[in-house]
Structure formats: structure tokens, C-alpha cells
Amino acid sequence: MDNRTNKTTTMMDTHVTELEKDIIKEILNIGLARAADSFAVIAKDKVMLKVPDVQLIEVKDLISLISKYEDSHFIIQSDIKGDFNGATLMLFSDEHISLLSNVCLSMLNVQKGELNVMQESLLLEISNIITGALVTQLANILKSNIYGSPPKAPKSHIANSLKDILVQHPLFQPLVFTVITKFQHNSKDVELPLLLFFDTSTLIKMLEIIREFKL
């Protein structure tokens, strides 16, 4: 099979219908329900996670999307390995960190822009809980061998940290989910943005599994 045939096959395989997008979103919602239950233990209140949007986007647009958060949010990254290749990014603003520090660590008068060891450990644990629960459910539903790596706070530009996913390829379009983690504190809704990425080969694998279900 020559390169042109390979490219044509890849383009056909990565065409996602609206129904298939809805199925992927529903699979993720099932996984996120478990993650929400786990996070509720730490947040000490009701937690809901929803996947409001899914899109295939160009690498440059993905980098631009991430860059918008780099200066204003503390970012925690967890890689997804095994049969799938992906990552989650949890995005914590100063307001989020202050509130979580108060709720989970009983800290008052939290200084903005500064994190102590306990606060960073808390954010890492939140990311670990949500990503771990999500990956476990995805593995069960899709009958795949996948696992989450320990979360980390990238010290360099986030694009460098995501180099295993942001492969420069003319046909590469990462599958991106924007997830809103919403929890309640004193009857007030608090939203934490989360980005979930999968590379093209993972998208093709997911579509193959979904299409087998539909047969």
C-alpha cells in the first residue's frame, strides 16, 4: 500500500459522524460519573462532571487553546498510556486554588500566585483521582488496556510537555474534549475546566470499537 492510499485510509477512518461523537461523549460521561463520586470525597460536597464539547482540531489551534490558560492557571497534566495515547490537563485558577485550599486543607487567607507543598499535592491528587477513575471506566467499557501515569505540574511550555501527542503530521488532528468539573460549595457552583486529548491513532481505535458495537 503506497503513501497516498495510507493517507486516504487514515482520512476515511478518522471521519467521525455526529452519532459517533455522541457515543464517545456518552462513554466518557459514564467514566466521569465515577470520577465525580471520587472527587466528591475530597471536595466534601456534590460534584458533577460533564463533557459539553468534543472537536477535532489542528495542532496549532490546540496549542493556542492551551496557551490561553498558561499565564492565568496552574496546570496539572496526566498522561494516558497503553492501548490509547492521550492526556488530561486540569486547569486551576487562583480562585479555584484558594477555594480548594479552604475546603480541603482548612486554609484561610490563601496567597494568590503562590503554592506551598500541601497545595500542590492537593491539586496533583485531584487530577490523579479524576484521571484515574476516568481511565479505569474507559478501560472497562472499551475492553482496552490503558492506564494513567502519575500527574505532574509541567515546568516548561505545555506544548513541550505534550510532545507525544502533538506530533507534527499533515493529517494529525487531536481529538479534544472540554470537560467542566462542577462542584458545589456553600450552595455555590464552582467550575474547574479540564481538557482531555487523544491522538489520531487512538481516535481510530475508539471508532473501530464503537463501530463493532453497532454491528
Image (cartoon, grey):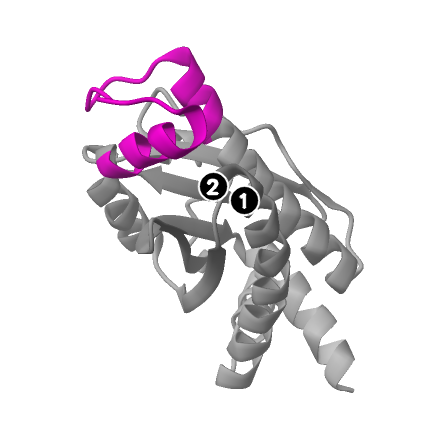
The amino acid on which the numbered mark 1 sits, given as a three-letter code, is Phe
The x and y percentages for residue 131 are 57, 43
The x and y percentages for residue 102 are 34, 30
Mark nearest the camera among 1 and 2 is 2
Whether 210 is drawn above or below 146: the answer is: below
Secondary structure at numbered mark 1: helix
**Left or right of 108, for residue 207:** right
Would you say residue 16 is visible in this rendering?
Answer: no
Q: Looking at the rendering, in which quadrant would you find the N terminus?
A: bottom right
The amino acid on which the numbered mark 2 sits, given as a three-letter code, is Ala
Q: Which mark is residue 43?
A: 2
Crowd band around label 2 with a 10 angstrom C-alpha radius: few (<14), some (14–19), many (20+): many
Residue at (61% x, 45% y) in the render: 38
Per the rendered image, the range of residues in magenta is 95-123
> Magenta segment, principal secondary structure?
helix
Residue at (57% x, 35% y) in the render: 128
Residue at (54% x, 67% y) in the render: 4
Q: Residue furthest top?
A: 117
Q: Which residue is label 1 attached to? A: 39
Whether 203 is drawn above or below 21: the answer is: above
Q: Looking at the rendering, in which quadrant would you find the C terminus?
A: bottom right
Mark 1 in CB contact with mark 2 (< 8 angstroms): yes
Spatial CA span between label 1 and label 2:
6 Å
**Left or right of 57, for residue 24:** right
